[in-house]
Image (spheres, rainbow, N blue to C red):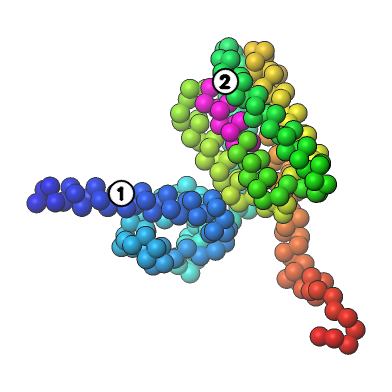
Amino acid sequence: MVKQANHRRAHGISVRERAYRYIKERISAGKLVAGSPVSELLLAKELGSSRTPIREAMKQLDAEGLLEQNPGGGMTVAQLKREDIVELYELREALEVYSAGKIARQPVRPADRDRLRLLVDQMLVLKKELEESEAQSLGKEQNQRFIDCDLGFHALLMSLTNNARMQRMVNDTRLLIRIFAIRRSGHTAAQLEGIHESHRRILDAVVEQSPLQAMQAMAEHIQVSQQERLNEYDSWRRETALRQHLPGIFEPKTQAGRP
């Protein structure tokens, strides 16, 4: 009996973890968008499980800020408010600026330096592709490559702190910002140039073992990113208000006399 109970308990934990990862992946991939309801019943059918582990996984995601309780019951994918964006960036700045100073106080291994340099230079590769295509901003595939390079640079840099707790907190914070960021289009060539320059300055200061310069470069980089996110959020809120109060201006224009 004890063995059977332990087996069921272990199985339940396994299903809950699988449900947790499944929901998180769907949110990260944009299949569950901010503000949309999350159905326990539907997820249970998709995963072939009971609703209990789904409910437990959703409670964990609620505690992490990815889901939120509905006043009328149930849960929805969280939609960040303006103050949430500010708080997340304040947390990110506190952790990453401190980390940049800590990393710069010790030599960086040549292998890590070269990997970081490669990630930095990929921004210029994307910028060149964008200019040659004469497009205004990155396309879907290019934008995914940008995300991989940007996250890769910061994740590898954070790994040099040898502090697993800080790495996890920064990764979770950046994930929330990325998932709920209101970005209407990919980065422009000018933005890619700016990000490349910021990353280069951070890396140069770290390699040269200049803690103050590394911290300053990281702070400026995060502050610029925060302002971009806030501008996007404010623009989205204005457009949302206009759509609610003046929907006619967003309707496609028709020829005179035609519906």
Q: Amino acid at mark 1?
A: Ser
Towards the viewer: 115 or 87: 115
Q: Dividing the image into 4 quarters, which one contains the C terminus?
A: bottom right
State how far apart marks 2 and 1 are (Cα).
35 Å
Query: Which residues make up the magenta segment?
Result: 150-160
Q: Amino acid at mark 2?
A: Asp
Q: Residue at x 60, y 24 (%)?
A: 115
Residue 117, percent from left and from top: 65, 24
Q: Quadrant of residue 127?
A: top right
Left or right of residue 10: residue 185: right
Q: Residue at x 46, y 30 (%)?
A: 165
Q: Is residue 241 above or below residue 78?
A: below
Q: Residue at x 30, y 49 (%)?
A: 14
Q: Residues within 10 Å of mark 2 (few under 14, many from 20)?
A: few
Q: Is residue 158 magenta?
A: yes
Viewer-nearest of discs 2 and 1: 2
Towards the viewer: 166 or 14: 14
Residue sitting at the far left: 1
Under tag 1, what secondary structure? helix
- The image's mark for residue 14 is 1
Residue 108, percent from left and from top: 58, 15
Earlier along the polypeptide chain: callout 2 or callout 1? Answer: 1
Under tag 2, what secondary structure? helix
Residue 59 can be seen, yes or no? no
Residue 4 can be seen, yes or no? yes
Q: Is residue 238 above or below residue 119?
A: below
- The image's mark for residue 112 is 2
Q: Is residue 179 above or below residue 31?
A: above
